[in-house]
Amino acid sequence: MAVLSYMTTTHFDHGAISMLPQVLKEQGLKHPLICTDKGIVVAGLLDKVREAIGNEFEVTVFDGTPENPTEESVRDALDVYKSAGCDGLIALGGGSSMDLAKGVGIMEAYGGPISKHAPLAGGQIGPIVPLVAVPTTSGTGSEVSSGSVIITDEGQKLVFVSGTIIPKAAICDPDLTLGLPKHLTAATGMDAVTHCVEAFLTPVVNPPAEGVGLDGLERAIRMGYLKRAVNDGSDKEARWHMMMASTEGALAFTKGLGAVHAMAHAAGRQHELKLHHGTLNAVILPVVLRWSEGENDEKYARLRRAMGLGEGADLADFVEDLNAEIGIPKNLGDMGVTTDMIPGMVEHALTDVCHFGALKKPDADGYAHLYETAIAK
């Protein structure tokens, strides 16, 4: 039996940020904490959001979000939240800011350590304070997703999943992504592509989610908006379609993800490397596509059609060529990942919640082989 579910209210278009005061009122917020990072502040995006909010609301800012949110950074933001007497959250930025804000909501309501709330630990997450998400990249789709990824104090990179941490509303304004650097446009864009591909391939039965994922993939690849956004950061039409592809990728992965994400999460916990999640997905995706080929020929054929490829085209080769064209690193070795890290990454990947949604589930030897390939290819 299929169980179908969908997500939240999304205000989507150029200039959608003007809807933020209305959304805050609808959520009953008077003093939200904005969770963001210093790059957003320097880029002037925080100023744009504060201008849109106006003087009707009291606002406190936490700009200490790291590239890969940690339990420590969640505690730091929660301390600011409590000391300022905030009553809700605004996540402003990419997936890291949104993951951190969701972590703040979880720990504000239910305390720590945060690891006790992870699904594989039997964690049950109830309601949290209202959260409004304002993405400034087109990649994670976390503004409409039920997940949050946090590195715990013990060094585990855990996925927290609950319908209660889906933002109450999302403000998707493609104008906030104009001028995003080329390398981040490429990395976040491939994150969205990976979500669409991997969510579609999971064995869970949810045709509406699959259709949404294929539509996002069509926009990014067949219609060429990913390349356009990378080549011209001021292309407003391309930015609109890539933000839609990003949102659709997350709507699609309501049915789950797979081995690409399990591997990326495990590699991303290498704190000293500060690896970008979207870049990891981009590099690992063709490795897993090649390894999983033959598990479901019909789905591979549908992916080819959505991507505008010919019958029998090699999906893995296509993704590798696309990565090279838009400036993604060739392999994990170029990103600093070494073979001595493989045992720890394998152990983590096998327990990652995304592992259980894989089209073809690797065992320990399988993950070791995939990492070896991704490091040296």
Image (cartoon, rainbow, N blue to C red):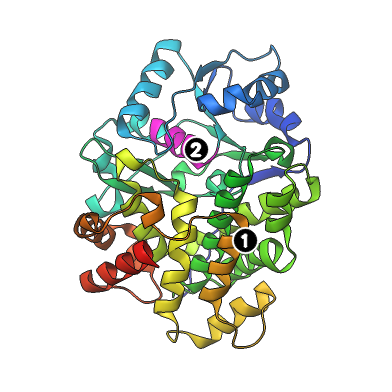
Left or right of residue 33, residue 236 in this image = right
Numbered disc total: 2
What amino acid is at disc 2?
Met
Label 1: element kind: helix
Find residue 129 and name its label. none
Label 1 packing within 10 angstroms: few (<14), some (14-19), many (20+): few
What secondary structure is found at the residue carrying circle 2? helix
Residue 265 on image: x %, y %:
35, 52
> Relative to 237, is 321 on the left or the right?
left
The residue indicated by pointer 2 is: 98
Q: Quadrant of residue 90?
A: top right
Q: Residue at x 45, y 82 (%)?
A: 293
Instruction: Decide: is 1 above or below 355.
Output: below
Residue 99 on the magenta span? yes
One can see residue 375 in this view: yes
Quadrant (top left/top right/bottom left/bottom right) for the C terminus: bottom left
Q: Main secondary structure of the magenta part?
A: helix
Name the residue beneath numbered marker 1. 325
| Distance between mark 2 and mark 1 Cα atoms | 29 Å
Q: Is 311 or 298 nearer to us in this picture? A: 311
The answer to whether residue 308 is magenta is: no
Residue type for callout 1: Glu
* Side of 132 relative to 259 (left or right): right
Which mark is in front, 2 or 1?
1
- Magenta-drawn segment: 94-104
* Residue 220 in picture, x, y percent from top left: 67, 61
- Return the residue nearer the eye: 219 or 114: 219
Residue 212 in the image, given as x and y percentages of width and height: 63, 65
Question: Residue at horizontal 25%, vertical 56%?
Answer: 345
Q: Residue at x 60, y 51 (%)?
A: 186
Crowding at mark 2 (Cα within 10 Å: few <14, some 14-19, many 20+): many
